[in-house]
Image: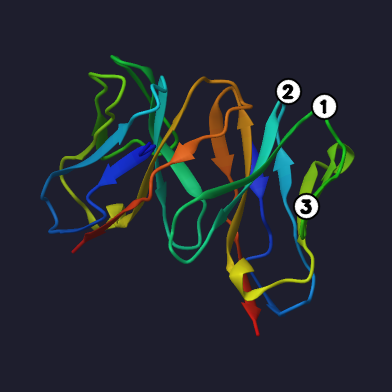
């Protein structure tokens, strides 16, 4: 069985603070993919990043960075110098054999 | 290029009524999915299809039916609406079943059952 756990329900920060979102997953598969999606207040789902199980390199894209650690089954996401536009729900997801399993999401609230 | 289009965006139903959520994609994707999102929860898979004429149950299929007569369309039918089906529904598609594929999501359909 697959499972994705996002233990943080909501995180509130003041603009320019960094925020880290935790994601822990469970799977018995050796090949799998991990994703992060953003859901802004408008409701659509926006793809942010994909990482396969064989690639543990961390990745940085602008103010976003991701830390994948297979040993702890974690795929954490950090927003550096947060902005109000980062306010959204962020979902971590695990895909194995084509079916995407989502975590419950973390609501990020960035106040000016 | 419209991507994945869902209609309606909003709908209010009375208990026991039936309705169909429409989903169409113009990317010639074989794989299509229906998810529901409840408040404070992640998305849960209702049904999926690997091609025209082929559908299968996901994690939460009870109370729903689907059909896939064409590659483009994947409607979701609620036969006897119940308050527990109040949710936001997302349709998605992908070009293959590979776990690497990024799903393209529609904008969502918010359904309220009273």
The answer to whether the residue labelled 1 contacts the one labelled 2, judged by CB atoms less than 8 Å apart, is: yes
Q: Name the residue under label 1.
A: A54
| Residues indicated by labels 1 and 3 sit on the same polypeptide chain | yes
Q: In which quarter of the image is the C terminus of chain B?
A: bottom left
Q: In this view, does A89 lie above or below A24?
A: below
Q: Which of marks 1 and 3 is nearer the N terminus?
A: 1
Give the left or right position of residue A104, taking residue A76 as reference: left
| Residue A71 place in picture, x, y as percent | 89, 38
| Residue B56 place in picture, x, y as percent | 37, 22
**Residue A1 in sight from this viewpoint:** no
Q: Which chain letter matches label 3?
A: A
**Residue A75 in sight from this viewpoint:** yes
Q: What element carries label 3?
A: strand
Within 10 Å of disc 3 (Cα), the crowding (few <14, some 14-19, many 20+) is some
Residue A76: numbered disc: 3
Q: Which residue: 44% across, 62% down?
A: B39
């Amino acid at each position: 069985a697959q499972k994705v756990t996002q233990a943080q329900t909501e995180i509130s920060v003041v603009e320019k603070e960094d925020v880290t979102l935790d994601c822990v997953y469970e799977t018995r598969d050796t090949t799998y993919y991990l994703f992060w999606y953003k859901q802004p207040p408008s409701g659509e789902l926006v793809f942010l990043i994909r990482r396969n199980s064989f690639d543990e390199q961390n990745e940085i894209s602008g103010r976003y960075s991701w830390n994948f650690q297979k040993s702890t089954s974690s795929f954490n996401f950090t927003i550096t110098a947060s902005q109000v536009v980062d306010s959204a729900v962020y979902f971590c997801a695990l895909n194995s054999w084509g079916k995407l399993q989502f975590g419950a999401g973390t609501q990020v609230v960035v106040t000016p | 290029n419209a991507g994945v289009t869902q209609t309606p965006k909003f709908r209010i139903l009375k208990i026991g009524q039936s309705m169909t959520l429409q989903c169409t994609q113009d990317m010639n994707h074989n794989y299509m999915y229906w998810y529901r999102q409840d408040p404070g929860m992640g998305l849960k898979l209702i049904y999926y299809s690997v091609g025209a004429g082929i559908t299968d149950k996901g994690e939460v299929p009870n109370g729903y039916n689907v059909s896939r007569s064409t590659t483009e369309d994947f409607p979701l039918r609620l036969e006897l609406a119940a308050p527990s089906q109040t949710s936001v529904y997302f349709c998605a598609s992908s070009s293959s079943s590979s776990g690497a594929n990024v799903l393209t999501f529609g904008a969502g359909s918010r359904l309220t059952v009273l």
